[in-house]
Image (spheres, grey):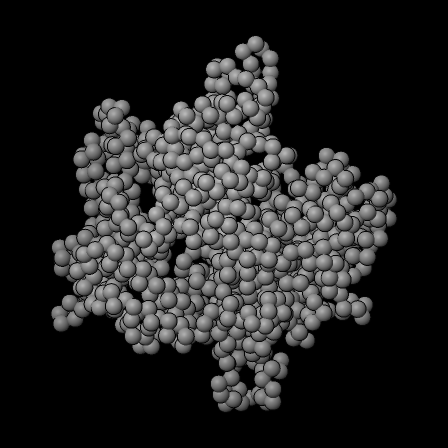
Amino acid sequence: MTTQPEQVLENNLISQLIGLGHQPISIKTENDLLSNLKSQLEKHNKITFTASEFDRIVIHLSKGNIFDKAKTLRDKYVLQKDNGEKAYIEFINQDFWCQNHFQVTNQITINGKRENRYDVTILINGLPLVQIELKRRGIELKEAFNQIQRYQKESFASNNALFNYVQIFVISNGVDTKYYANSPKQSFKQTSFWGNEKNKKITQLEPFTNIFLEPCHIAKMITKYIVLHESDKILMVLRPYQFFAVEAIIDRVKNSDKNGYIWHTTGSGKTLTSFKASQILTHNPKIKKVVFVVDRQDLDDQTVREFRAFDKDSIDGTENTKMLINQFLDNNRPLLVTTIQKLNSAISKAKFRKQIEALKDEKVVFIFDECHRSQFGDTHKRIVNFFTNHQLFGFTGTPIFAKNALCVNSIKQTTANLFHDCLHRYVITDAIRDENVLKFSIEYYNVFKSKEDFNDIKVIDINTQEVYESDNYIEAVANYILANHNRKTHHRTFTAMFCVSSVDILIKYYDLLKAKKEAGVHNLKIATIFSYVANPDDADANGEIVEEDFPDLNIAAESSATYETIPRKDKLDLYINDFNEQFKTNHSARDGVTFLNYKKDISKRVKNKQIDILLVVNMFLTGFDSKSLNTLYVDKNLNYHGLIQAYSRTNRILNEKKSQGNILAFRNLKENTDDAIALFSDKNAKETITIDSYDIQVKKFNKAYKELMTIAPTVDSVNDLEAEDDELAFAKAFREIMRLKNILSSFVEFTFDDVYMKEQEFADYTSKYLDLYDKIKTNNQKESVSILNEIDFELELIHRDEINVAYIMRLLAKLKDAKPRDKAKAKKEIIDSIAGESELRSKRFLIEKFIENNLPKINDSGNVEVEFKAYWQAETKKALQELSKSELLQPDKVESIINDYMFTGRMATEDEVIEALEKQPSVLQRETISVRITEKIKDFVKTFINGVDG
């Protein structure tokens, strides 16, 4: 036998769990589950329930969704006993997590929309809190994830919905094992491997089980390291490196008075880690205050929002120093978030200092966010001198070492100088290996291809400021960006930042890009932000990202400059006006508050892909997270931590299409990049952090193409694949082709002439690949089992934003004007575009019908769009009537369901669908009819509404 059967894997796992201390229990039905729950809660609470008392507990447990139940699990229930007395019922012991009761069972059957049997369930005090789904070795792990997603829809919420109490899911095929928190919004990319303190992944099921599913550890993960995200109403669970970092801080506080810092690479979730550390420390009775310190006002606001998202009652921000003092003195507020500037005012200004003298000798723990930026100097000294019983902890993605340190008072200040030991490290190579951040694709563009292009400048050294400020240079860079922006951002599926060396250079670039837009050269949405306070530019070209700040009117030490006296403020006003006109807003930069509001809006619009290119000097190059940003244009010198921080704006994980962060450097940053990678990982890490060169990517593509040819040597041969194993092999081979083509497409030089596969051939195979996907979808609706369910088709790699209905209408106009000898070719172009685009395939029949029946009757190609819209409206109306007639639905109620679905994204409930019927069905028929109608409505929306306005 080449693969281990799933049943053997399951039996071995249960035996292992029993050996670890989980008590075996046979539970096959929901009634068994309830019976066991009663006895386990009685045992845990040392009480006996009457039948009616337990009924009240079950009613209480049945209420709410997954998020509500996570809160119910952690709260005590006040049970009104039959004799009138009250009893406080605990569902899980959070303080002494080992003192819970652990059981393991398998193959529980729950009847919901469909009958489902779950593989292995760990019960804690009778509640199913950990669900483990297994697949035989060789099956893609994502299939186990997809199976749990189906359970979410079909049965977890059925009956008393006790499986909505699951806190952690574990998925495994024996070789690979991952875990994740229970959330319907979860994606497979949010699943994690467990690891050890040295970040070595533990993938095999047996060692994973020994460590992660050991009773005390899994209970600790549930009670201490699950975070309830209040804003999104979802559960989050810490990854292993976050867990070990928090444990290290807790241990340092418990057993030492030394400081420490956490080195976790940018993009790895430091805010969640620091919140959990802060939250746990506040429960230490020996600690008076935990103070989370950031170094900018906007980060203060951002951190407060993020902390409140994890726990809405955890903190309030400190709007001014007086409020900070009040919170220091408030015994009911153990956790504070403030800026380094306000903290400095609190301990250095006499009127404030005197008020908090009472806390001078109390135990205060300070946690500094992004401590690579906190070169505090005198402020650091004031903190450690004032608070005599302090402990300091720092978080950084790029520590300051002697090699990249700046001098403060003639002394090189490093992270270790200020924070002592590194308690845990998780560097960029770890994060890339774990697929928590992306690799970088770095291209260096040489503007100076010919010195004759710059013959008005004495080019002695091309790094001279004179050259970089010349009009010829700026024109060349701007043209290159405009020519390649669509390619870099996958036709504006993603966004970009452009960082330059000074405000004066930024002004030149912005004005040039604006002029080119007004001249019709491009239609990109451009925005900018820069400080109107006199911050140093990058004149010395040392690559250090200097924090651009703005006056905080609530800080006593306010800048003495007035807005009117600040240089370049007229340009800033002009650019903010451009922004206001573009987005119908009313921002200004009259003071720190209005400027901060402008900055917040820019941040939001970059994340929402409403800005194509954001021009900056230093702002947004640190501390800014946007998953939709994938490209950084660089026309400034960067090095060490500044370089890694800037590059890391692009490498947040989003989806399959975002395969890497793109860096396009117009300066010679290769040596600086290599040095920075070596400093913050190791000298051999370059291949891990950057993707392979264009030539190597071409070789990989050609190798994948040869593999495809062994399976399906022609497009038509795909039709001849009879065995599902062969179809699966084709799907996997072409998926690899798509992945590699997605990467190649981001390179400026990519052309299909460089690879064995031709563009038309790629389009034809894409169509066959989508045919196979459609076949699987149809089979799933018929509830037939297919091994093709084992693969994720990754359709986002096929979807091209430039191919939409608007694009097709332009092709239709082109077809109308085509000469008779060219019509067949023009028609084929349209059909190929539809066949190779997942969103348009459902519209294929209707578009072909329009070409055959309506297009010949149109006299002027300028009327194609109007005629097509009229045709589409008529077909939509007819399809809606046919749907209503065939399913005996009330048309007005169907329209209402569709409108609600389009507006909210929420499909109607079973009751709402049944209510739309002209005649109510029997109870036995309700579910079948509701499921069928729901699928038809979704298909209707996909065909007639989605993408039509694109």
Which residue corresponds to the image point at 39% horizontal and 70% vertical from the top-left?
744
Task: Give x and y (percent) for residue 871.
Answer: 20, 50
Which residue corresponds to the image point at 24% horizontal and 23% vertical from the top-left? 922
- Apparent side of residue 492 relative to residue 341 in the rendered image (left or right): left
Q: Is residue 532 above or below residue 90?
A: below
856 relative position to 604: left or right: left
The C terminus sits in image quarter: bottom left
Tell me the residue at 43%/53% (across/down): 175
- The residue nearer to you, when weighing 254 against 331, is 254
Q: Percent from the top left, x then y, of residue 155?
A: 37, 34
Residue 657: in sight, yes or no? Answer: yes
**Quadrant hosting residue 754:** bottom left
Q: Residue at x 49, y 78 (%)?
A: 445
Residue 842 in view here: no
Out of 602 and 499, give the one closest to the viewer: 499
Eyeballing the image, is 398 above or below 17?
below
